[in-house]
Image: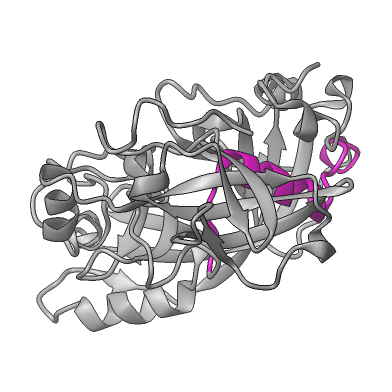
Amino acid sequence: MTSGLPLPPWLSQALPDPGAWPVRTTRSVQLLHLTGVDSLRFLHDQTTRNLNSALPGHLRRSCAVTTTARLTALLDVLVDNHAARLTVLAGDGSALHQRFDRYLFPADRVTLLPVTQARQVSLLGEDAAALLAAEGIAMDCTAVGWRPVSLGDARALLLRGTDFGDGVPGLRLLLPDPLPLPPWLEHRPRLSATQVELLRLQQGTPIWPNEINDAFNPFELGLAGAVDLDKGCYLGQEVLARLVTYDGVKQQLRLWRSDTALEDLPGDSVMHDEDGTRAGVVTSRSALGTGSVGLAVVRRAWLGASSLNLGRVTVGLGLPAAARFPPGTHPPNAPASP
């Protein structure tokens, strides 16, 4: 078995040996559940993906944004028959629930159920589907994005893909707490919190509140694949459309890496060029062996730069592996992953 991932050496060295894959990650996620014939119409108006054309069994990664297109949550929408579940991958699920409740009108045929917690177990690697199929759990990912499955006497949800998007192959199980894992799943190698974070950084997956906050929009964070611009009116749509139409994306997410140890980096998060001009801001940082790695949002004039300065430390810059920007909004000479 292999990971099936084209990982850079610095990350491969930090992750389990390829022969140990598929590996698993486990974390708690918040779930929002809407029922009623207007559920998809309501979510279509409140999130960035086209849900009016979605059928039961479809799964669509989407964003919740403000009226000014600031990103508040990264979501997976699980479409059901006159209903939908939202897995909050990053963001404040309770705040999103309050927002939905505020925008619902008496005429809307929608019931917004309370926020619940679930345990998400991800199997990462190209052989994840084969491992599940050997246990009698299969899903044709070309036809559907999610479906209910049985784990012994309990019910769970099987989801296509991983937290990291298309950049990391795999499947996920949403389990009710405190359902124990079956032995075949419990025995798979589990990534540590540090390993998960390094993979997140390399892929460029934003988290709350580091990258997901009132400072950035989805296009700046490499989430163009989670935005449909031709779906009609929705909250934040006008701003996002103008950003693309008028080439208005002024900054973008970048991966940075340094040989300087994490504890020796300056506490200040502002990046500068050689002339001392402010060029960006570090949003995430983590230790990497004897060095450090992280994410930053870099201003437009420096999107082609291969390095910038953090205090007196020079850090290398590159594109995160899974980041997707609107066409024409980053220079052709944007550096590869450092």
Viewer-proximal residue among 164 and 68: 68
Q: Which residue is more in the foreground, 67 or 38?
A: 67
Residue shown at 25% from the left, 32% from the top = 328
Where's the C terminus, which quadrant? top right
Seen at 69% across and 60% down, the residue is 312
Q: Quadrant of residue 38?
A: bottom left
Q: Which residues are magenta?
A: 184-208
The colour scheme used here is one colour
Residue 104: x and y in percent read 20, 77
Residue 194 shows up from this direction? yes
Residue 146, horizontal then vertical, whole percent: 48, 38
For the residue pair 148 and 59, the one nearer the viewer reads as 59
Does residue 153 appear anywhere in the picture?
no
The quadrant in which the N terminus is found is: top right
Q: Is residue 91 magenta?
A: no
The answer to which image quadrant residue 39 occupies is bottom left
Question: Quick check: 305 left or right of 3?
Answer: left
Left or right: 171 with respect to 31?
right
Q: Toward which corner of the image does residue 40 lie, by quadrant? A: bottom left
Q: Residue at x 12, y 52 (%)?
A: 242
**Height in image: 72 above or below 17?**
below
Which residue: 24% across, 69% down?
Answer: 110
Rendered position, 168 above or below 191: above
How many numbered discs? 0
Furthest residue toward front = 275
Magenta highlight on residue 198: yes
Image x and y of residue 121, in percent: 70, 47
The percent position of residue 227, horizontal first and vertical second, equals: 28, 45
